[in-house]
Amino acid sequence: MKIVAMVGSNRKESYNMKLVKYMQNRYANKVEIEILPIGQLPFYNQDDELNPPELVKEIRGKIKESDGILFATPEYNASISAILKNAIDWFSRVETVLVDKPAMIVGASMGALGTVKAQLQLRQILNAANVSTRTLPGNEVYVGSAHEKIDDFGNLTDEATIQFIDSVVDNFVEWIEKSVAYESAY
Ligand SMILES: Cc1cc2nc3c(=O)[nH]c(=O)nc-3n(C[C@H](O)[C@H](O)[C@H](O)COP(=O)(O)O)c2cc1C
């Protein structure tokens, strides 16, 4: 099963990136996770959408071929980051490659609430007509106080969080399988 990941932080020591890389390793026997370079996308400009940069075409192709999307969001001023919104905007236009894609969300922040506000907004954005991912309900992964739960080597060290993410990934895999079954039935 092929999952593409959009990580909303371009910071070298990003906890969200570390979390996704941790997931890449931990669940390698269940899903292949490819991290999309959305931090390198130029700002979306409607003037360019019919003749977009190569990177937009390249990432579009990878989204199309994937079985699902993993969103990892930081929280910037009670919302998602511009990097993540920019990517969603690019892939919601001309070719609406996000529509009907199974999606799951994780988020890490140093704050106690661990991206609650950002994730609420992200779910709303993912419901927009030209985005319309099939977002896994519930299964809300908030990694708050991330600096205390992710070590210098990028390992998640909090056992309760590890076990919860294990169960969410299992639910996501099942969600994708159901999604495929639904598509082949109609
Ligand atoms: C511009 C900016 C705004 C932020 N706003 C919030 C916020 O509203 N809530 C929160 O929990 N953390 C906030 N933070 C802290 C981030 O959650 C923290 O920097 C986190 O590590 C960012 O994710 P990353 O490690 O993946 O880069 C903010 C950080 C920045 C740079």
Image (cartoon, helix red, strand yellow):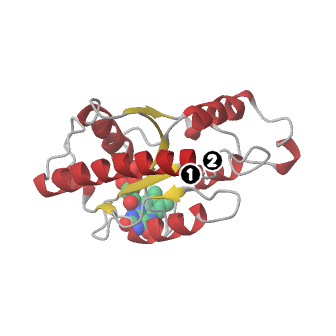
142 in relation to 67, above or below: below
Is residue 116 among the parts visible in the rendering? yes
Is residue 9 among the parts visible in the rendering? no
- Which quadrant holds residue 30? top left
- Residue 75: x, y in percent? 44, 62
- Neighbour tally class for label 1: few under 14, some 14-19, many 20 plus, Cα within 10 Å: many
- In this picture, residue 53 sits left or right of residue 135: right
- Neighbour tally class for label 2: few under 14, some 14-19, many 20 plus, Cα within 10 Å: many
Indicate the amino acid at tag 1: Leu
Would you name the residue on which mark 2 appears?
87
- Residue 134: x, y in percent? 52, 57
- In this picture, residue 114 sits left or right of residue 99: left
Classify the position of the N terminus by image quarter: top left
Residue at position x 35%, y 34% in the image? 31
- Residue 126: x, y in percent? 57, 61
Q: Secondary structure at mark 2?
A: helix
40 in relation to 125, above or below: above
Labelled pair 1, 2 in contact (Cβ < 8 Å): yes
- Residue 139: x, y in percent? 33, 62
- Front position in the image: 7 or 110: 7
Q: Quadrant of ligand 1?
A: bottom left
Q: CA distance from mark 1 to mark 2?
A: 5 Å
Indicate the amino acid at tag 2: Ala
